[in-house]
């Protein structure tokens, strides 16, 4: 049986467009708003990434760090993240949701306990940014046994030999980090060069769903729409921050932003 992530990509391919993948942090700016945001943007996004907040998010730029800080300040715990997912899935059972974060929280919780909570709440996939290949093989196999996608990461500096191994061992989605930077940085490489590298990776196994993340905004998304999927995160975290600063409703603002992003790739 195909996973919800695989089905989402299949649906987008039929429509001849990339999957729109959004990233927000669980609990930003409140647990309630976080759930409302997921419910709203899921009408436009094909796959939802939800970050579990961390006090030292090393791969993340200022916007996502700000989101994590707001969530932690409001007392968000890992059990709350699972509660948000469970409530979301109750009304949106077919919309794929991927948890993204750092291994430390999984280690503290215990791998088996963490994966059990993922399964019970309805998590479809995991991105663990500081658990690289091949160190992640055992954990990725545990995920597979529980029908949870473990999403491998590739970067511009991944060697060809290593890339082939990662692609061979990957599940239903691979995440290509477009540039060597923290999240939210401006694109330092032209979309044309990103796509050249992207296409060379795709040639290794054209059947695999390969998405591009890091530096994608409303200004760059259209030029990258030949990819299987595009991840937008920092721009959404920035929208929440700006809404709060202006005394506006972040749920309504994000709904408009994600709607406009979707229009740019159709």
Image (cartoon, helix red, strand yellow):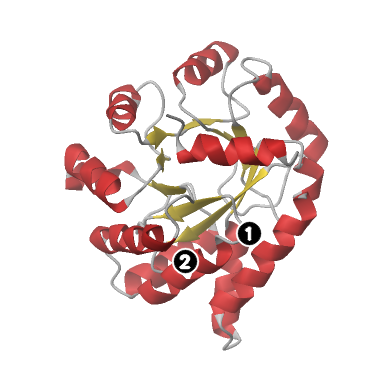
Extreme top residue here?
A: 161
Answer with the quarter of the image where residue 158 lies.
top right
Q: Which residue is drawn at 61% across and 86% down?
A: 246
Query: SS class of the residue under badge 1?
Result: loop
Cα–Cα span, label 1 and label 2: 21 Å
Q: In which quarter of the image is the N terminus?
A: top left
Q: Mark 1 against mark 2, which lies toward the viewer?
A: 1
Q: Tell me, for residue 153, which label it has, or none.
A: none
Q: Badge 2 local density, few (<14 within 10 Å), some, or many (20+)?
A: many
> Residue 204, how many percent across, how many down?
63, 14
Q: Name the residue under label 1.
A: 44
> Residue 39, how many percent across, how many down?
49, 66
User: Is 150 on the left or on the right of 18, as rendered?
Assistant: left
Answer with the quarter of the image where residue 181 lies.
top right
Q: In this view, does 10 lie above or below 25?
A: above
Q: Tell me, for residue 67, which label it has, or none.
A: 2
**Which of the two labelled residues, at mark 1 and mark 2, occupies the earlier sequence position?**
1
Answer with the quarter of the image where residue 177 lies.
top right
Name the one closer to the observer, 205 or 77.
205
Q: Residue at x 59, y 86 (%)?
A: 248
> Residue 86, how many percent across, how many down?
32, 59
User: Is 37 on the left or on the right of 147, as rendered?
Assistant: right
Q: Residue at x 29, y 47 (%)?
A: 118
Name the one closer to the observer, 74 or 115.
115
Q: Residue at x 45, y 35 (%)?
A: 3
Q: In this view, does 144 lie above or below 259?
A: above
The answer to whether the residues at label 1 and label 2 have Cβ atoms under 8 Å apart is no
User: Is 188 on the left or on the right of 44, as rendered?
Assistant: right
Name the one closer to the observer, 129 or 28.
28
Extreme front residue here?
A: 1
Q: Is residue 228 above or below residue 208?
A: below
Q: Badge 1 local density, few (<14 within 10 Å), some, or many (20+)?
A: many
């Amino acid at each position: 049986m195909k996973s919800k992530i695989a089905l989402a990509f299949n649906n987008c391919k039929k429509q001849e467009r990339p999957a729109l993948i959004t990233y927000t942090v669980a609990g930003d700016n409140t647990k309630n708003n976080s759930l409302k945001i997921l419910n709203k943007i899921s009408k436009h996004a094909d796959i939802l990434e939800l970050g579990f907040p961390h006090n030292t998010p090393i791969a993340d730029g200022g916007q996502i760090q700000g989101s994590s800080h707001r969530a932690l300040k409001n007392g968000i715990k890992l059990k709350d993240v699972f509660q948000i997912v469970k409530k979301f899935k109750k009304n949106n059972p077919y919309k794929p949701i991927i948890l993204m974060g750092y291994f430390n929280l999984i280690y503290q919780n215990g791998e088996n306990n963490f994966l059990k909570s993922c399964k019970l709440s309805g998590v479809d996939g995991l991105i663990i940014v500081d658990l690289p290949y091949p160190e992640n093989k055992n954990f990725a196999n545990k995920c597979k046994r529980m029908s949870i996608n473990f999403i491998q990461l590739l970067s511009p500096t991944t060697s060809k030999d290593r890339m082939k191994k990662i692609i061979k061992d990957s599940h239903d989605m691979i995440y290509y980090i477009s540039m060597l930077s923290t999240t939210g940085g401006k694109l330092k490489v032209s979309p044309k060069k990103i796509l050249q590298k992207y296409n060379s990776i795709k040639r290794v196994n054209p059947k695999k769903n390969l998405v591009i993340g890091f530096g994608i905004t409303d200004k760059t998304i259209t030029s990258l729409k030949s990819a299987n999927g595009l991840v937008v995160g920092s721009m959404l975290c920035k929208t929440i921050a700006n809404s709060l600063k202006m005394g506006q409703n972040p749920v309504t603002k994000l709904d408009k932003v994600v709607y406009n992003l979707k229009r740019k790739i159709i």
